[in-house]
Amino acid sequence: MNTSTRAVKQNTATRPTVLIVGGGLAGLAAAENLAAKSRNHFEIQLLEAKRTTGGRAGSFLDNRTGGTVDYCQHVAMGCCTNFLGLLERQGLDGYLHRYTRLKFLHPDYSESTFKPSRWLPAPFHLLPALAGLRFLNRTQRRQIKYALFRLFRQASSELDDAVAGAWLRANGQDETTINDFWSVIVVSALGESIERVSLAAARKVFVDGFAAARGASDVLVPKLPLIKLIGGHLAEAIEQQGVDIKTGQVVRKIAHDGKFALISTADGVTHHADHVVVAVPWHAVGDLLPDGTLKHVDRFTDAPSSPISGLHLWFDRQITDLPHAVMVGTMAQWVFRQPWVDEQAAEGFYYQVVISASQSARRLSRPQLIEQVIAELRHAFPLARKAKLLESKVVTDPKSVFSISPQFEAIRPSARTAQPWLHLAGDWISTGWPATMESAVISGGMAASSILASEFGQKEGLNSGLPRNWLTRLLIKP
Ligand SMILES: Cc1cc2nc3c(=O)[nH]c(=O)nc-3n(C[C@H](O)[C@H](O)[C@H](O)COP(=O)(O)OP(=O)(O)OC[C@H]3O[C@@H](n4cnc5c(N)ncnc54)[C@H](O)[C@@H]3O)c2cc1C
């Protein structure tokens, strides 16, 4: 566009202005945190490229059935205290179902229930849960306890370049134990194969997600489509805190004129701001900033990603009344029954199968993939044998999550950059968490703290998870 026709939004605000680029959970959390912590000291605007906020935690309207469906079912765990805290502060935590036990289905064994004790102290609360996994024999359970203990005794800072798969083999885990236990949990929590994920990330899952506290492994499933929960209720609550959220605003470039940050959008407007929070995914950040603004930026842009596939299936009848189940030893990894009931009957009975690190699923044609997964569901659920598949859709985001290798861990940046006006947010920055809603929300808090530190020199700690008892403090290194 010709510069003479370009609209310029001068900074006429009486308060310092903050512009957030990206309305995923990270950008929304940055806005919420900053508005609350600074008690409206800043004028905050958020620009989101798409028509709704929520980013990867989003939904689509399926034309054939007319139903609203999440691109991919999202679950949180009890250990996700920052994500849950955000919803709680906005009165939205009631929109989550909490499950304290998990069903595991292995094709060669009867159904298993993973049910941590509600009275044994952590980490011993996991012992009955492990005993409930019928597809593991006594030797395998012993192997798992040994490796868990070794993980507890190694601080995450000591794990540097270690990869989970190699470490597990070196620590006495046989291939069946790796495939049926470690891999099942690691792949669904980290979205990446055990042969590539950093041991530090895998340790985070087993320590914080299971061992550190009772309730850490509870599974929380939204009762509403994500577009209503995050893009709707959460975004509206944040607007009520005084944040100006604008959707359909594609930011093209961010620069600085020595006084203000200049943020140019695709429709030719240039916004001025005192601070900018860049809350876009790791692979998009390099395009927005002038060369040399951010260290390692090429390495983020080119960093490997991992795909996650959601298979959306509509049957003519119910195939199981389980709300969800983990599937072991099959292409299908999780199956979810539609958690909101209102739209179900008219369109058929909706189920979603999730396949993380879905490279091998993507090598099959769509009909082959559907056929294989339906065969697995028929094996797992007798009711599925008579059910007719009415509709199906496969949705894969090839860049669902960054691949959490030791190399990626080493370059994850802080929210604070070398420029006092520029701050980062996103599940990919150095939150200590894998690519999750929890990581995105933590990153938003980090960006808000970075702005406060830049303006007032104020430093603040983050909510660091569920409280630990004396036993876990003694047994598990930080
Ligand atoms: C298939 C799938 C399944 C998942 N399952 C789970 C799960 O079960 N549990 C869990 O905790 N996490 C899960 N995740 C991960 C979770 O969705 C992400 O970690 C989280 O949503 C990331 O939030 P974010 O704000 O960092 O990034 P994003 O959600 O990617 O948000 C970035 C936003 O920036 C916007 N943007 C980009 N460029 C521009 C621009 N130039 N101008 C303006 N706006 C821009 C984008 O449109 C987007 O809205 C899953 C992810 C996927 C893809």
Image (spheres, rainbow, N blue to C red):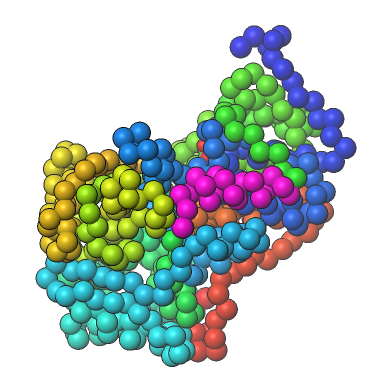
- 238 is within the stretch colored magenta: yes
Residue under the point 46% across and 49% down: 225
In this rendering, would 364 be left or right of 453?
Answer: left
Q: Main secondary structure of the magenta part?
A: helix
Q: Can residue 475 be seen in this view?
A: no
Q: Residue 214: x and y, percent? A: 47, 80
Answer above or below: position of 391 versus 106: above
Q: How many labels does the image show?
A: 0
83 or 420: nearer the eye? 83
In this rendering, would 350 be left or right of 283?
Answer: left
Answer above or below: position of 125 versus 426: below
Residue under the point 52% across and 33% down: 50
Extreme residue toward the right, this view: 14
346 or 357: nearer the eye? 346
Occupied quadrant, residue 322: bottom left
Answer above or below: position of 286 versus 94: above
Give the magenta-colored segment's residue range.
223-241
Q: Residue 69: x and y, percent? A: 39, 45
271 or 219: nearer the eye? 219
In this rendering, would 42 be left or right of 348?
Answer: right
Q: Can residue 2 be seen in this view?
A: yes
- 84 is within the stretch colored magenta: no
Answer above or below: position of 298 versus 222: above
Q: Residue 309: x and y, percent? A: 30, 47
Occupied quadrant, residue 132: bottom left
**In the rendered image, which quarter contains the N terminus?**
top right
Residue under the point 28% across and 48% down: 348
Q: Residue 357: x and y, percent? A: 30, 51
Extreme residue toward the front, this view: 346
